[in-house]
Image (cartoon, rainbow, N blue to C red):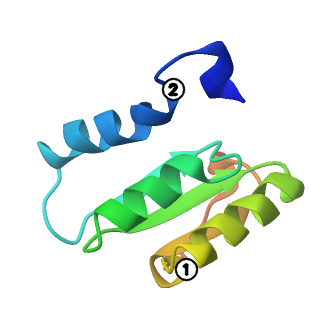
Amino acid sequence: MMGQVFPGYEQLPLILLSHLRTYLGAGARVLDAGCGTGSALTTFATNQRDWSFVGVDPAESMLDMARAKIDAAGAGDRVALVFGSVDALTNERASV
């Protein structure tokens, strides 16, 4: 849907991942605040298998969609999804 409004939108996670790789090394942990349906997390996790990820979103329905995408991509073991806001995160809730 966003790709229809903003041509090239689907490529943004890959562009961002390329940028993150210049700063983060092996074993990095990445937080996606407002992860929505998990499109970026899915792209990150399938293209950077040595990193772990935490996605946070205040909408449970979005997290359900994110979990389905991430599991379908075989990356569920490296992505934790948390319902709520970033300021409510604890180490236990944000661990993969």
Q: Is residue 11 left or right of residue 89?
A: left
Query: Which residue is painted at 51% across and 47% down in the image?
Result: 40
Q: Is residue 65 above or below residue 22?
A: below
The residue at which mark 1 appears reads as 76
Q: Residue 28 location, x and y as percent?
A: 26, 64
Crowding at mark 1 (Cα within 10 Å: few <14, some 14-19, many 20+) = some
Indicate the amino acid at tag 2: Tyr
Q: Residue 80 location, x and y as percent?
A: 57, 72
Residue 9 image label: 2
Q: Is residue 6 above or below residue 13?
A: above
User: Gap in Å between the C-alphas at discs 1 and 2?
Assistant: 24 Å
Q: Is residue 15 left or right of residue 58?
A: left
Query: Which residue is painted at 42% across and 31% down in the image?
Result: 12
Q: Residue 68 location, x and y as percent?
A: 71, 70
Query: Which residue is painted at 61% across and 75% down in the image?
Result: 72
Indicate the amino acid at tag 1: Gly
Q: Quadrant of residue 50?
A: bottom left
Q: Is residue 5 above or below residue 25?
A: above
